Image (cartoon, rainbow, N blue to C red):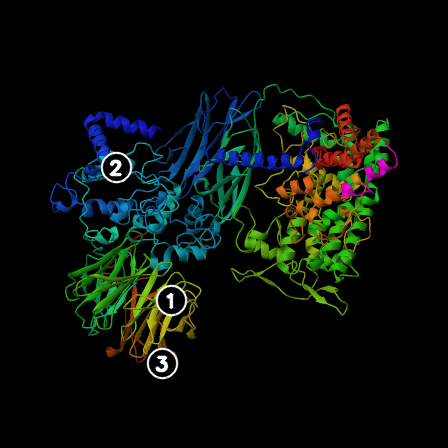
Amino acid sequence: MDLHFMRLGISSLMCVGIALAVARADDAPRATEPDVPAAEAPMPVAGTVSFRRDIAPMLVEKCQACHGADKAESSYRVDTFARLKTAGDNELAPFTAGDHDDSELLRLIASGDEDERMPKDGEPLSAEQIALVKKWIEEGAAFDGGDEAATLASILPRLPHPMPPEAYKHPTPVTALAFAPGGNELFAAGYNEITVWNPADGSLVRRIKDIAQRTHAIAFSPDGSLLAVAAGTPGRLGEVVLLNPADGSLVRALGKAADEIFDAQFSPDGKQLATAGADRTIRIYDVESGNELRVIENHADWVMAVAWSPDGSKIASASRDKTAKAFEAATGNLISTHSGHGEPVYGVAFKADGEQVYSAGRDNKIRAWKVADGGNAGEIGGFGEEVYKLVNRDGHLFACSADKSVRQFRDNDRGAVRKFDGQTDWVYSVAAHPATKRVASGGYDGQIVVWNLEDGKPVATFLAAPNYTAAAVK
Amino acid sequence: MRIRHSRNSYSPWLFASGLLLAAATLVCGAARAAESEAADKPVALEPIAGGEPQRIDVFPTEFKLQTPRRRMHLLVTGHYADGQQQDLTRAAEFVSSDDKVVAVENGAAVPKGDGKAEIIIRIGSHEQRVAVEVSGQAAADPVSFHFEALTALTKQGCNSGACHGSPSGKGGFRLSLAAYDAVLDQRTLVREDYNRRTNVADPDASLLLAKPMMQVAHGGGKRLAKDDAAYVALRQWIAEGCRVDPDDAPQCVKIEVFPKAGRVLKRPAHTQQLLVLGHFSDGSVRDVTDLSTFTTSDAAVATPRPDGLVVGLDRGEAAIVVRHLEKVETCYLTFVKDIEGFAWTNPPQFNYVDKLVDAKLEQLKYVPSELCTDDEFLRRAYLDVIGILPTIEETRAFLADTSADKRKKLVDTLLERPEYGKYWALKWGDLLRLNNKSVTSDGVFKYYEWIVRAFESNMPYDKFASELLLAQGSTFANPPANYYRATADTNDCTETTAQVFLGVRMQCAKCHNHPFERWTQDNYYGLGAFFNRVQRKPTARKDELVVWIARGGEVTQPRTGKQMKPWLPLVGDAEDVGDDDRRTQLVDWLMRPDNPFFAKVEANRLWSQLMGRGIVEPIDDFRDSNPPANALLLDALAEDFISHGYDRKHVLRTILNSRTYQASAATTPLNKDDVKYASHARVRLLAAEPLLDAICHVTAVPENFPNMPPGTRATQLPSPDVNNDFLKVFGQPERQTACACERSNESNLSQALQLFNGPLIHAKLQNKENRFHKLAAAGKTNEEIVRELYVAALCREPNENELSASTAHIDGKEDRGKALEDVCWAILNTNEFLFQH
């Protein structure tokens, strides 16, 4: 009742508005004609509201968690533009181009009644944000994001990320590591940056900035010309970018998501990049064009890791849904599911023959299973804690674990080769460079240890925290 | 469907009871819905009532603030001329004598600099001073992970069973229920999913804060605000590096809740601020109110706010359970109000039961109902004591008896009847799980006979319990050994013994600390250590089992991997008795006169069998958050029980002879709202077995049970393995658990159908050998037959209306037999017959 009165109240202040609205309602064909037809919408210029730049970030941040793919309160979703304009249970038009009186979305975010105001239970949007929505509707509610069916998170403009701390007060967990193709540089996850180190002595070589808060994967293209980075800000953003490894400049932004992206791996021929993320998808991009080629939505929870088979025909994945899976890379069709872990699965790698997959997870085991049917092929135990990333390089499988160790196994018979000690906390990441006989690992406490593969002795142990000065605790 | 015509012409009792049952269920459901709705509404806070107190007092009277983050709330109480007390905390003015030492912010003393000062508290013309000593302000004061960060998560409800505390968590984020597993929680909050939830570099960006504050959308909605103590604790814990507490960090050893004594608050002064003090192992006493959790035993009586202000909503008593990590304390508050038209009537008091019941009734302003009539008493006492209805001759003799003490004499007679032992063995058969599966069919008979004899001989309850708990040897030669056959493993023994003899439901603590109570997982396995050496092995004889005690063996707590010592509730670890039978220690402790559980649990059970509701209800769920409706009464009954050598008949006799027991079931406007305090008799549906026996009695057609001698009553069945649909429909338990709740007292549609046109009643009505067909055949008049039926079923003669309506119905029908069946059917379907009243 109250709503009704309020709406009338507003409208009566704008008699013209009412007249227009009535006329439109009576005259159906005109109702679809916005003041500025979408097709002819000019490119956003100063003073004009851009959906992609001004509206979409707000929707993703403030609305999507309750009106998205996971949860669609009142059957209304805002995770794509197509859905944004489709009414939910109340069957009221979310917005009508040029007519902010017939725009339920605007009414609800601007409502003075706390019981109905959106976001429900959250801080109200700022007056500026509400004004932007109103202006955007008045200007014709144009969509400047390309595909209306694409997720809003994926069309958000890329904004510069915050600067990393000049001097670290707290080491950041090293959640990703990669050797440069020549083995002379070690790339590590920092806080809003990637730090590059000399693996021989642990000296800082350079810092690559403008990276999302947490980096979960760093991968070099086979020819070494590109660096793929999967990163994100927990609960807020996920991003996959291709960088020039030499200077860290952005070559191409591939994908964006509403939450973290955990892995990115180049296909063996370097033409495609597969990613895995908290949106439960595996995505395959064309490296050259940046186009998204395929989305594999098969897991029921976050996808934590992906791997390509040596011939590039298959993809394997590890998921928090307690399964590991294998797919045909060309079609995205599911080949098999392995449920042996019974716990979240964090790491995945193909056996060199491409017939088996290794996966590892919270059950403190690496399990080998057959691509053909997901059946057990063997297991590797001995870990005292959960196992994270797996790297299979030149006949050897490397694994890192919360038991503070890195272990090396033979790919052909799963035999243990060596256990690398020296880490002082959980080991989240591992990278190997057999040509220079090095393996490196990164820990929760920010420590990187580089070992000699031949004798297992540490070569360098250092904190991946530039200019670190311990924070004083009061 | 059978006749309908007579319904309206009978007394108000005469209704299609099945429909009434269904209706009653609906009404109950609606009432419950309304109740929960009321609980969800925000608590209305009225201003302090005012009035001029004679004096005020302040608690604490002095205190120390030893670190920069300590706070202290002060409680201010006004004492009035009429003896009332009022919480004046919200109305008081607080002033510091030295702002450089201590300031008062939001009602709490906040340290500002080392030194000594006073807080001056004023209410009108009254003034009190509290000395404050502030120290340690220059030292570091890191947040404790255990006692601040985890309690903050509990306080905000993050780790509740409905949210992230559920076994699988929510949204991929799982916490231990009420923070029972700090190690797991630390790991989850800090390490899991690559350090996703906490951000040491930028604490405010931590998902752990951003989600419950709805800065990042949160399925659970907004749960945290910047001015919450929980926010401050969590944020600082993150900023300090998400550290675990050092091994030598002070531990909270106990909490105390103030005000202490059970305070009586009278409307409109019906609010009370609580203060929670934590005693730490370093000797410090800290105000932990802000990070304690408050819950109420009765949301209709009083509701606590998160800040510890309890707001009374109706008259009655509420236990406010205060939790700080695994430390749990309870504050009992009584709320009273003036009731229009209330005047105490000084009803007669037959014994101490009435005295204690009346004290509570007078305080809460309920007036008890009058005494019930003789016929009501007769029927009630027979059903309660021996489970069957009196014969027509017994009824007529009792009603004709004019002696003043005839009720007393009847009680004495009933307690000595042979049916007494069998009926109470039925009740204990439920608790001890007498069924073929648990103790084998041969075992059932031997075990049953032992229980019957125990009651017949009035075996003292302590002996009864110790024979069960210390049983050894053959389950055939020594039937109580079946206790350990029915409880097939250590956990089952632990849970059954706790529930039956301590009145405590320990099951929750098997997997985690009890979410609402003081019982911890350590307690569960500590209690289990009394039983883990009990061994069972079969013998050559079929179905025989021998129970014996092994000379070693320990219990391991599955979460911590620690070996548990035998543990006694409220006492602690028991002494090491080496290879001796540890159960003896438990039994010795149970039978100590100061044992707070043993005698009370049985006294409460006896009370509930007679009164239809325990003083503690449910009867096997004694806990701080479920206080007795009348604690003094339960204490007195238990004391009387102990001082009379655990004589159960003595307690039964005392209750049966009280005015309280003999009160009418009819309510008055001044007690109709009372369900807890025994102001009137409680109307309840007969249990399955007495109901079936009563139907057999009225029709004089016995029920036949397989493998039982003809004439065996339902109330005298050793086990429920007789596959009788009627009994099952009316709630006969299968006896799979030791929980009294397994016997259902819910009404349902199947019961209505059984009563309307079920095969059992139908067959008994049509049986030509039944009471009324035989009377008709013997040439009795319709009036004589109707009178017999009324006396048999209801223990009273029919009134004029009932008699004339019944005889008119029979006279108007061609088939006299069918018409008689109609009348008997109608009587069996009256509430007066189906209900205990």
Q: Are marks 2 and 3 on the same chain?
A: yes
The answer to which of marks 1 and 2 sits earlier in the sequence is 2
The verdict on residue B769 being magenta is: yes
Residue span colored magenta: B764-780
Q: In this orientation, which residue lies closer to the viewer: A361 or B242?
A: A361
Q: Are marks 3 and 1 on the same chain?
A: yes
Question: Do tag 3 and tag 1 residues touch (Cβ < 8 Å)?
Answer: no
Question: Do tag 1 and tag 2 residues touch (Cβ < 8 Å)?
Answer: no
The answer to which of marks 3 and 1 sits earlier in the sequence is 1
Q: Which residue is mark 1?
A: A324
Name the spot of residue A474 as percent of width and height, x first.
33, 49
Name the spot of residue B248 as percent of width and height, x first.
45, 55
What is the number of the mark on residue A412?
Answer: 3
Q: Which residue is mark 2?
A: A103
Amino acid bearing label 1: Ala
Name the quarter where the N terminus of chain A is drawn: top left
Taking the spot 58% from the left edge, 35% from the top edge, the residue there is B28
